[in-house]
Image: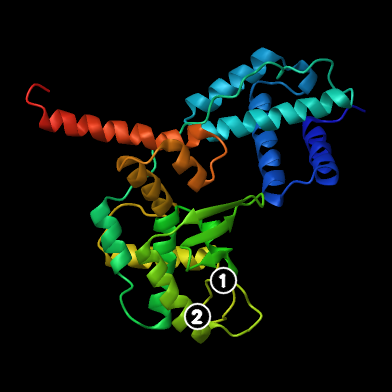
Amino acid sequence: KEKTMQEVANSFGAFLEKNRKLSKNTLLSYGRDINFYINYLEEKNITDFGATNRATVLSYVLYLKNSGRATSTILRTIVSLKAFYGYMLSKGLIKTDPTVGIEAPKPEKKVPQILSLEEINSLLEQPSGTGAKERRDKAMLEVLYATGIRVSELIELDVGDVNLDMGFIKCRNSAGKERIIPIGRICTGVLSDYINISRSEIQTDAQNKALFLNMSSGTRISRQGFWKIIKQYSAQAGIDKEITPHTLRHSFAAHLLENGADIRSVQNMLGHSDISSTQVYTHLLSNKLRDIYAKAHPRA
């Protein structure tokens, strides 16, 4: 008895779970993508994957595009279908793979949200007290803007990663690659106050080397914890832009380039492996210069 399309999809899911080291979310994404594809095929009265061809797959991609699906969704769907058809070919369930040669659309590079210098200053001035929480929050915001590190890198910092005398921090990305980033006088001073005065008030375990600690538990602060902090202070500062923890990273890069930093140095500080990721900020700067020209030049 031939398997139904759903049974083939289920066996593919079981294969991925057993043979590939994928996260639960990735497995769910594969399953969702294949099920949506099956629904589409059934609407076209196709009940066997062997009856599909290149035109079938391309028409499905066009259907997703016309339905208003994001480029990132279409990109992920094509990856899922390529993996699925590759699996079926290896099991002898189909004779040819119709996804061969189908190119995924390039993901759209979103223009990052950037804060003006006035907005940055207003945000950084919000935690102004001398309590442990205010000192910790100010230190976190200052480090993010001074270095442009990712929030995941910020919360993973240990006390030993900070060198106040030399004025730099050492951070590691998700792949464990280390980079050293300078910090300025203001950031150094704020960090010094937090480390030497307030951190011990929050710390509950002397063995805990985490730099930034949760106020109630004394353990390493979480991403969610920092998200609440930045939302709180951006509201206090009256900033009506949609701010995320990544906004300070974007602003760090844009402000450096705006003030003459070379793109390679900014790339190194951000930890971008591909310079095209950093060039997004130069496009942003070009747009700003065009606006300035249009407003200022008498013949614009």
Vertical position of residue 188 compared to residue 24: above or below: below
What residue appears at the point 89 percent right and 22 percent down from the top-left corner?
A: 92
Amino acid type, residue under disc 1 in the picture: Val
Categorize mark 2 by other alpha carbons within 10 Å: few (<14), some (14-19), many (20+): many
How far is disc 1 from disc 2 in space, using C-alphas? 10 Å
User: Element type at marker 1?
Assistant: helix
Q: Quadrant of the N terminus?
A: top right
Of the residues tagged 1 and 2, which is closer to the observer?
Answer: 1
Report the side of 159 relative to 238 (left or right).
Answer: right
Residues tagged 1 and 2 counted as in contact (Cβ below 8 A): yes
**Does residue 81 appear in this view?**
yes
Q: Residues within 10 Å of mark 1 (few under 14, many from 20)?
A: some
* Residue ID for mark 2: 199
The structure residue drawn at horizontal position 38% and vertical position 83%, both measured from the top left corner, is: 131
Q: Which x, y percent locates residue 252?
A: 38, 50
| Amino acid at dot 2 | Arg
Please name the colour scheme applied to the rendered image. Answer: rainbow
Quarter-wise, where is residue 243 in the image?
bottom left
Q: Position of residue 110 (x, y in %)?
A: 42, 37
Q: Which badge, 1 or 2, is on the more N-terminal residue?
A: 1
